[in-house]
Image: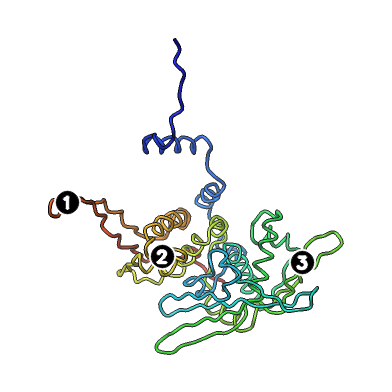
C-alpha cells in the first residue's frame, strides 16, 4: 500500500539543512540588485582625473551623520558628536502657498538626503560658487545627478528630502587646540520647496539653488572627495554610506606606523542609533554586513575586523555554562583615500 508523504515543518529541520536550502535558493536566483551594483562597482574604477566623477561631503558629515531613518514628526532636533566634532540639526518651517501659513517641515533623513547633499556639494565645488545651476526638472536631477531611476517613489522621496534640507538649520561645532568654532546656518537658502508644476505635470524647481554663504565657505575648506561609483553602489543604505565616508575621511590621516583601535563601544556611540547597549551584539551584526559591502568596493581600505571569539565552557561549583568573550573592535591602518587627486 502506497504511503502518503507528509510535510515536515521548517522548525523541525536542522539549522544547517535550512542554511543549505537558503544558500541553494540564492544561487539559483542569482545576485540581488544591491549585490549587482556592488559587483559592478568593485570591478570598475572611476576616472578620478574627471572632476564630474567626484562627489563631495563636508568633513563633519563624514564624522557625524544625518538621521539614518525617519525620526518621526515629534523629533525636531537631531544631535550627534564624535570626539571634538558635534553636529546639531533643527527642523524648520516653511510658508505654504495655499494656506499662506508657516508649517513645520521634518528633519532630513536616510540615504537620499545624503545623496542630495553630496551632489549639491559637488556642483558648488566645481563652480566655486554657492549659487548652483541645476536642471529645472527634478526628474533630470534624480536620473542624471543622483543616478536613480526616475520613478514616482524616488521623485517624491527626493523632493521631500530637498524640502527638509532646505528648511532645517544646522549647527557645526569643532574644537581645535583649545579653541571652539561654531557655524550656525542653513545649508540651502532662497529655495521654493513646494515645487510648482507646469501644464504637463512635470515637477519643476528653480534653475539655481543657493547654498548659504557660511556653509559654502566652510565646505570649500573641509570638503572630502568621494568616488561617485562607490556612492551609487552604496545608495541603498544610510549605514553603508556613513561607514564609507567615515573611512574616506579617517584612514589616510592615521600615522603609517600607528594603527588605531576603535572599540565597539565607540562604534556603537558613533553609528548605533536605534540600538541600545543591551543590543550591541545585534548592532555588530548589522555593522559588519554594511562594512563588508563598503570594503568590497573601497579595496584600498585596510581595516581589520577581529575574528569573533568562540564561546568557551566554564565550570563553577559544579555548574557548567558557556560564555562568549567580548569583541574588541576594528583596527584601522593608514590607507589611501578612495579619491587620490583633488581638484586644482
Residue matched to label 1? 319
Q: Residues at badges 3 and 1 in contact (C-beta under 8 Å)?
A: no
> SS of the residue at dot 1?
strand
> SS of the residue at dot 3?
loop
Residue matched to label 3? 136
Give left or right: position of 334 versus 92: left
Quadrant in the picture for residue 218: bottom right
Label 1 to label 2: alpha-carbon separation = 30 Å
Q: Nearer the viewer, residue 266 or 216?
A: 266
Quadrant in the picture for residue 279: bottom left
| Percent of width and height locating residue 154 | 67, 57
Quadrant where the image shows the N terminus: top left
| Percent of width and height locating residue 69 | 55, 63
Q: Nearer the viewer, residue 75 or 246?
A: 75
**Relative to 152, does residue 77 appear above or below in the rendering?**
below
Residue matched to label 2? 276
**Relative to 35, does residue 275 appear above or below in the rendering?**
below
> SS of the residue at dot 2?
loop
Give the total of numbered labels: 3
| Percent of width and height locating residue 54 | 57, 65
| Percent of width and height locating residue 245 | 49, 66
Label 3 to label 2: alpha-carbon separation = 44 Å
Amino acid at each position: 500500500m502506497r504511503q502518503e508523504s507528509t510535510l515536515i515543518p521548517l522548525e523541525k529541520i536542522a539549522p544547517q539543512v535550512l542554511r543549505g536550502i537558503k544558500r541553494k535558493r540564492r544561487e539559483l536566483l542569482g545576485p540581488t540588485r544591491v549585490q549587482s551594483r556592488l559587483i559592478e562597482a568593485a570591478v570598475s574604477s572611476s576616472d578620478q582625473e574627471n572632476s564630474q566623477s567626484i562627489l563631495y561631503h563636508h568633513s563633519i558629515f563624514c564624522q557625524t551623520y544625518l538621521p539614518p531613518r525617519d525620526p518621526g514628526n515629534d523629533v525636531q532636533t537631531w544631535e550627534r558628536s564624535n570626539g571634538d566634532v558635534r553636529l546639531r540639526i533643527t527642523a524648520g518651517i516653511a510658508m505654504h502657498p495655499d494656506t499662506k501659513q508657516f508649517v513645520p517641515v521634518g528633519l532630513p533623513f536616510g540615504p537620499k538626503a545624503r545623496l542630495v547633499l553630496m551632489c549639491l556639494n559637488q556642483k558648488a565645488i566645481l563652480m566655486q560658487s554657492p549659487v548652483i545651476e541645476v536642471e529645472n526638472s527634478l526628474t533630470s536631477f534624480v536620473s542624471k545627478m543622483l543616478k536613480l531611476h526616475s520613478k514616482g517613489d524616488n521623485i517624491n522621496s527626493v523632493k521631500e528630502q530637498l524640502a527638509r534640507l532646505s528648511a532645517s538649520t544646522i549647527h557645526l561645532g569643532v574644537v581645535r587646540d583649545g579653541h571652539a568654532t561654531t557655524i550656525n546656518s542653513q545649508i540651502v537658502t532662497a529655495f521654493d520647496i513646494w515645487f510648482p508644476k507646469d501644464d504637463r505635470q512635470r515637477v519643476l524647481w528653480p534653475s539655481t539653488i543657493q547654498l548659504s554663504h557660511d556653509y559654502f565657505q566652510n565646505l570649500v575648506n573641509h570638503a572630502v572627495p568621494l568616488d561617485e561609483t562607490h556612492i551609487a553602489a552604496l545608495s541603498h543604505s544610510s549605514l553603508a554610506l556613513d561607514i564609507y565616508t567615515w573611512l574616506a575621511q579617517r584612514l589616510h590621516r592615521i600615522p603609517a606606523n600607528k594603527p588605531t583601535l576603535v572599540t565597539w563601544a565607540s562604534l556603537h556611540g558613533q553609528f548605533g542609533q536605534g540600538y541600545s547597549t543591551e543590543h550591541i551584539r545585534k548592532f555588530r551584526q548589522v555593522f559588519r554586513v554594511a562594512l563588508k559591502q563598503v570594503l568590497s568596493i573601497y579595496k584600498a581600505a585596510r581595516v581589520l575586523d577581529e575574528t569573533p571569539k568562540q564561546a568557551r565552557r566554564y565550570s563553577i561549583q559544579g555548574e557548567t555554562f558557556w560564555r562568549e568573550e567580548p569583541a574588541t573592535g576594528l583596527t584601522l591602518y593608514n590607507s589611501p583615500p578612495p579619491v587620490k587627486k583633488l581638484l586644482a
